[in-house]
Amino acid sequence: MRIKLRAAALAAAMIGFAIGAAPVASAVNCSLGQYCIHENVDFGGSTCYFTGDDYNYTNDNCGGLNADNITSSYSNYARQANFDDIYGYRHVNNTADTLWYATRGTFRSWVSPCNAEPCNDQASGHKWV
């Protein structure tokens, strides 16, 4: 029995190593309670930080860039709450075209695949649900 448990633990560790562990929020520059969108893949480039709904990224400045249509990766480091998941939307003020649904603790180093390809550099707003 002990050998089977060790073998199972080793296999789980190897799978975790092979697919990569989820990044730590500090590594992706997103604080607890925030949803963050990142200009580049792997959480790089400019970052926008949100603690509430934002249906219009054209009004947001992220490190000198307009936030509209720049998202290549995202982080949902929400606190456990009634509203801790995110819908990412393609169009300003339009919740009909959902790109992704990001549950609390989701760190996506690349936005694809998503619900409605193409999704890279397409996000224009989000809503906490």
Image (cartoon, rainbow, N blue to C red):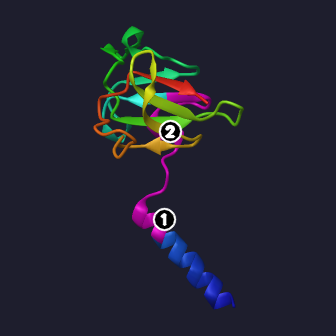
**Magenta segment:** 15-35
Give the secondary structure at mark 2: strand
Q: Position of residue 117 (x, y in %)?
A: 30, 40
Distance between mark 2 and mark 1 Cα atoms: 23 Å
Q: Which residue is mark 2?
A: 101
Q: Specify the amino acid type for callout 2.
A: Tyr
Q: Report whether 121 appears left or right of 87.
A: left
50 or 21: nearer the viewer: 50
* Label at residue 4: none
Vertical placement of 78 versus 51: above or below? Answer: below
Dividing the picture into quadrants, the one containing residue 115 is top left
Which residue lies at the image location 51% right of the left edge and 77% below the top edge?
11
Percent coordinates x, y for residue 32 in the rendering: 61, 32
Observer-nearest of 63 and 112: 112
**Is the N terminus in the top left, top right, bottom left or bottom right quadrant?**
bottom right
Asked if 66 appears above or below 80 in the picture, the reply is: above
Q: Give the residue at mark 1.
A: 16
